[in-house]
Image: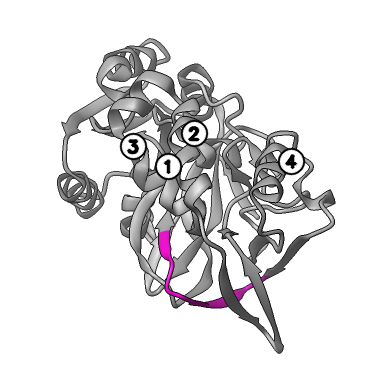
């Protein structure tokens, strides 16, 4: 990991907020106030309702030479803009206003509150962290294939605003009961494996929800972490979700997991793919790592493991 102390002078920032994220509409003004109370100069502030508008605002700020660009939203918001930051001199600051905020946790902003995020911006360091790439597009934290992708697509923005992370559990009942297993062929390095499963998770970052995907996964190791299970009964699927909640998924007898810099997944039949909770096509897919591609604000003392 490469990290440097944040500038000691007053920071000038551009803030872009995604109004589709769970808490942006209600918490955006508070975020601006917190920044200003801590001595941060907000030179421009924008709220947008469409992903393309958010990307346009971020790209414009980068083109203008703005060093610090803060994005208010959830994991989907972060993943939609990180490609613009890749290998630039601009630094992403995360204001976690989404449902799960896994990326903020991966960066050591835990708990993922506005207060902790603003503290990382004011007193933290600039770190260079990895980005994932899937079929040519950058992503921030994790990708899902199969059941979790179906659940994500069934979870409405309204229910996420009302229920928070519980919305995924509520929306998941139907897909869980109707889910069919699929055959997956996974290749990495000189290795390959075939497994029958209901879902596959591939993480660039450390967290899937509130759980480390693997005990030693980080966003600074140049590798992706893959996790799946071969249990196909409804009971075994439910047991996997409970194990994730308890941070014990790697102890399951049917757990399959590894880390690698490049992974290819093909399935039969084709399965939905989501990246950081946002729909992104179907299998087959190839994942790789763009090492140290993103400059981002992290709490002082960040190591990648929390």
Q: Upstream in the sequence, badge 3 or badge 4? A: 3
* Residue that appears at 36% across and 22% down: 40
For discs 1 and 3, the disc positioned in front in the rendered view: 1
Front residue (pair 303, 24)? 24
Please tell me whether residue 114 belongs to the stretch shown in magenta: no
Residue 9 higher or lower than 198, as above or below = above
Query: Which one is nearer the viewer's eye here, 199 or 32?
Result: 199
- Of labels 2 and 4, the one closer to you: 4
User: Dot 1: what SS?
Assistant: helix
Alpha carbon distance from label 1 to label 3 = 10 Å
- Residue 243, label in figure: 4
What residue sits right under mark 2 in the picture? 100
- Circle 3 or circle 4, nearest the eye: 4
Is residue 265 on the magenta stretch? yes
Q: Is residue 273 left or right of residue 66?
A: right
Reply above or below: 27 against 178: above
Residues tagged 2 and 1 counted as in contact (Cβ below 8 A):
yes
Mark 1: give few (<14), some (14-19) or many (20+) Cα within 10 Å. Answer: many
């Amino acid at each position: 990991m490469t990290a440097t102390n944040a500038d000691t002078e007053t920071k000038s920032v551009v803030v872009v907020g995604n109004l589709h994220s769970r808490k942006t509409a209600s918490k955006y003004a508070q975020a601006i106030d917190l920044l200003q109370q801590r001595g941060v100069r907000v030179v421009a502030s924008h709220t947008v309702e469409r992903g393309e508008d958010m990307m346009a605002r971020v790209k414009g700020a980068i083109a203008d030479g703005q060093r610090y660009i803060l994005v208010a939203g959830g994991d989907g918001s972060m993943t939609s803009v990180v490609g613009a930051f890749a290998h630039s001199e601009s630094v992403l600051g995360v204001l976690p206003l989404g449902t799960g905020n896994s990326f903020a946790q991966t960066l050591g902003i835990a708990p993922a509150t506005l207060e902790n995020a603003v503290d990382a911006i004011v007193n933290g360091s600039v770190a260079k962290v990895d980005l994932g790439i899937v079929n040519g597009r950058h992503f921030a934290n994790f990708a899902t294939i199969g059941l979790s992708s179906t659940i994500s697509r069934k979870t409405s923005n309204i229910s996420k605003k009302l229920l928070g992370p519980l919305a995924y559990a509520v929306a998941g009942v139907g897909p869980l009961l109707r889910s069919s297993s699929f055959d997956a062929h996974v290749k990495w390095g000189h290795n390959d494996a075939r497994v029958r499963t209901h879902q596959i998770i591939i993480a660039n970052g450390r967290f899937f929800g509130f759980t480390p995907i693997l005990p030693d996964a980080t966003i600074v190791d140049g590798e992706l972490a893959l996790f799946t299970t071969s249990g196909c009964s409804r009971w075994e699927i439910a047991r996997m979700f409970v194990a994730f909640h308890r941070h014990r998924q790697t102890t399951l007898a049917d757990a399959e997991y590894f880390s690698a810099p490049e992974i290819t997944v093909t399935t039969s039949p084709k399965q939905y793919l989501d990246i950081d909770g946002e729909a992104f096509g179907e299998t087959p897919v190839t994942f790789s790592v763009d090492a140290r591609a993103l400059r981002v604000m992290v709490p002082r003392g960040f190591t990648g493991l929390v």
